[in-house]
Amino acid sequence: MKKLLLFLTAIALLTACGNKTQNTNNAAEAADCTAIAEEVKPQVPLLITDSIGMDKTDEKAEVSVIVDWPTEGDEALIAAVREYICKTLGVKMTTDGKAAVKTAFQNHYNETAGMWEDAYMNDEDEDEDGEEDSGKGPCYTYMISIQKVAETDKFVTYLMDDHTYYGGAHGSSSCGGVTFSKATAKTVGYKMEYNDKTMSYSVRNQTLFNDKIKTKEFNDLLKAGLKEYFQDVTDEGKKGITDAELAEMLMDEQVSKLPLPGASPHFTDKGLEFVYQQYEIAAYCYGMPTFVIPFDKVKPYLTEAAMEFIPEK
């Protein structure tokens, strides 16, 4: 009887230990599953694009149109980017990228070739030797690209870059970016408007920067960015550019009160990129002053809406 009691007690103990071990394993597995669930975040779909382009060169015109047309991704984002592309190309909204590019290309070719014909085809004079001169000059140029240049879990940035030549000593270029939220498909930025009465520009519809951009600290960020740019383009072999030297390179701007660029800055994977157009603040020979202010430095000057665009590290 005593041996039977001892045997039953041992079985009970083993069963209890087995249940305890099983419960412990279940708890550990549950904890592991919870940890994995916390680590796995919903994936933000990439914006898949198709590069579509058309180009043509003849004696009258050199025309090129290139776009990164969105084909897959968030539907609202696709629609917003397509609308931006069509508006920039000057064509009606369409879901067909090839049709948009074809229409824009034909419009720009006709306009560019027409300008060349107006300038040269009806201008036949005699040259210095008394011989008839056809008056034909080099072909005119219109090139535009609208391409995706950055994408993170928070945003997609497109950059428009164009170049034109309609006679004269040189052509002209312009560049501007726009950043779309991957969560809402909305953008942040501002519009620069010219006031005929005051003969000056003013910022409208500001959703990118807060009022702190009026401070000396923000102006110092712009100044540092411009100094870095001009240091690279001048390549004078010395370190650093003084305020006085920067002032000499600028046109009418005061180093202590630098303006925002006419084109609203756009987001890159490294920070906020500023682009001043040709002749906007400096002579043609200096190109388009461009620089990036890192996120950690520009954060204090962004609106709450713009802060949502900063990617997570």
Image (spheres, rainbow, N blue to C red):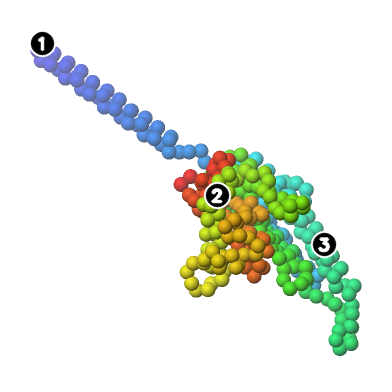
Depth check: 109 or 6 in front?
109
CA gap, disc 3 to disc 1?
A: 110 Å
Residue at x 23% of width, y 20% of height: 16
First-in-chain label (3 vs 1): 1
Judging by the rendered image, the residue that carries numbered circle 3 is 110
**Residue at disc 3, secondary structure:** helix
Depth check: 279 or 242 in front?
242
Residue type at mark 3: give it: Asn
Residue type at mark 2: give it: Thr
Q: Is residue 57 left or right of residue 263?
A: right
Q: How many other residues sit within 10 Å of disc 2, few (<14), some (14-19) or many (≥20)?
A: few
First-in-chain label (1 vs 2): 1
Residue 298 versus residue 55 in the image, above or below = above
Judging by the rendered image, the residue that carries numbered circle 1 is 1
Q: Is residue 299 visible?
A: yes
**Residue at disc 1, secondary structure:** loop
Depth check: 172 or 48 in front?
172
Q: Is residue 85 visible?
A: no
